[in-house]
Amino acid sequence: EARKILGLPQNAFVFGTVGRLVPTKGQSYLIDAFAKAYQINPTAHLVFIGDGRLENELKEQALHLGCLDAITFSGHRTDVPEVIRAFDGFLLPSLAEGLPACLLEAMAAYIPCIASAVGGIPEVIDSEKLGYLVPPKDSDALAQAMTEFSHKTDEERLSMGRAAHDHVEHFYSQHVFVEKLEELYKKELLMVESE
């Protein structure tokens, strides 16, 4: 259903990313990497969800690299939780990040992730069973991770998606944050009362 909404081929191996099309998100490195992965796996397809000032530049880059026909620029969307279910793998090639909500959302949706090892991302993807970490600005490493991931069996990808979901549920879900906040308030209250 999600693939129909995005107009994607049903038999494609879909990689996708969500974010503004701006330099700090590293999408130009992603297109370089995808062009390499696409040569190895011609069923690969890449989806960009988001808009921004780099859209035309990224399209020109993809055209020059011969992979524009295998890329969908879907623009800004309000149905992201529904349409990311079309993705076999989620990509976050950022050059800088804090703790990206889109990464947590993808993992919560059972989607294995390949992301740059920047900011808080290595704290989230802290094991190879949860996803892949690659150096920022390294399109070769990103292409290699994409190719390796696409060669995994369905069961291996499902297992990785389940592990990602369980990890986010255990460490980053709303009730976990509420519990941590309550604990912090209790400690502060005890300190104030003891003064």
Image (cartoon, rainbow, N blue to C red):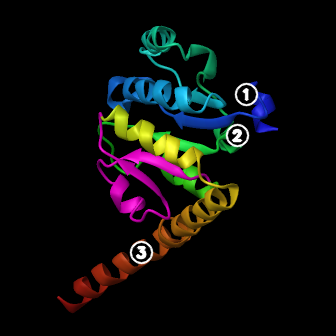
Front label number (1 vs 3): 1
Q: How many marks?
A: 3
- Distance between mark 1 and mark 2 Cα atoms: 8 Å
**23 relative to 195, above or below:** above
| Label 3 neighbour load within 10 Å: few <14, some 14-19, many 20+ | few
In primary-sequence order, the first of circles 1 and 3 is: 1
**90 relative to 3, above or below:** below
Q: Amino acid at mark 1?
A: Leu
- Are circles 1 and 2 on residues that touch, CB within 8 Å? yes
Disc 2 marks which residue?
86
Q: Is residue 74 visible?
A: no
Residue 114 position in % (x across, y down): 46, 47
- Are circles 1 and 3 on residues that touch, CB within 8 Å? no
In primary-sequence order, the first of circles 3 and 2 is: 2
Front label number (3 vs 2): 2
Please give the label number shown on residue 6.
1
Q: Nearer the viewer, residue 20 or 112?
A: 112
Q: Nearer the viewer, residue 137 or 98?
A: 137
Q: Which residues are magenta?
A: 111-137
Residue 75 position in % (x across, y down): 59, 21
Disc 3 marks which residue?
180
Q: Quadrant of residue 13?
A: top right
Disc 2 on helix, strand or loop? helix
Residue 195 position in % (x across, y down): 17, 88
In primary-sequence order, the first of circles 1 and 2 is: 1
